[in-house]
Structures are given as structure tokens and as C-alpha cells.
Amino acid sequence: MIESRIDVHESDPYADVDLAELPAWWSAAVEAFRSRPGPAYAPPRFADGALVPPVVSRLEATHDVDIRLLGVDVREGDPWEIRVDGTRVATIDRERTRDGYTRYGITADAFEELIADAVGE
């Protein structure tokens, strides 16, 4: 898998990657990160290593909702919110790893259950 080959500490970890072969959300993020100083893009992950964006996209389509993971007036170490259609349904721990990506303190399966409960299914 490409996510295990990306080292955000390299000058351009995507130099040998055909961005057209990545999902649209990923290639767009790579391009956006290239246009600013700092580390390369590394997709956020759940505690079990699953990538966050495809799980969120699938759940949004399944339940016809908008899901956001966001920090509101947070400092480092503060929990973030999980919102479904603008309503906070839970808070979640997150950390920035040494590998350069964000890891949320919940597994993909537990996140899916949380969203299903939030939408009443």
C-alpha cells in the first residue's frame, strides 16, 4: 500500500508516485501541501491504521450525512469533535505522529458504530 511507502520527511515523497492513480481526495491534498512550506501530506488514520478519508466518505454516502472531525479552540493534546450534520456527537483524542500523520484515538470499526448510533441506525 502506498501509505506505508510515504516518508513525509523526504524532500518529495511523492516524486515517484503517479498522482492520477491515487484517490481524488489524496491527490488533491498532495497538490495543496506542495504549494506551502512544511511536510508532505500523509493521510490521517484511525488507531488501527485504517485511513480516515475513505471511511468517512463511505459513511457519509451510506447514511446521507456530513461527517467532520475538527478541533474547536483546541491546544495540543485537546480532544477534537466528531460532528454529524453539524451536531457534535462525540469527542476524540488525536495526535501527530513522528511519521507525520494524524492518528485518531478510535478504531475504524468503533468510529463506524459511533456514526451508526448517532444517526439512529
Image (cartoon, rainbow, N blue to C red):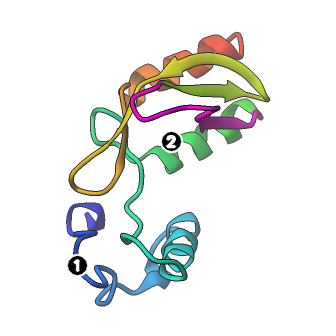
Where in the figure is residue 83, as x and y percent of width and height? 68, 27
Residue at mark 1: 10
- The residue at which mark 2 appears reads as 55
Give, as a single range, the part of the protein colored magenta.
64-78
Q: Which mark is residue 37?
A: none
Of residues 114 and 36, the one drawn nearer to the viewer in this rendering = 36
Q: In percent of the image, x 48 and y 74: which residue is there?
A: 30
**Quadrant where the N terminus lies?**
bottom left
Q: What percent of the width, then of the height, locates residue 117?
A: 61, 11
Q: Secondary structure at mark 2?
A: helix
The residue under the point 52% across, 78% down is 36
Residue 6 visible within the image: no
**Which kind of residue does numbered mark 1 sit on?**
Glu
- Is residue 23 covered in magenta? no
Q: Residue at x 41, y 67 (%)?
A: 41
Left or right: 14 with respect to 32? left
Depth order, front residue of 117/76: 76
Does 28 sit above or below residue 42? below
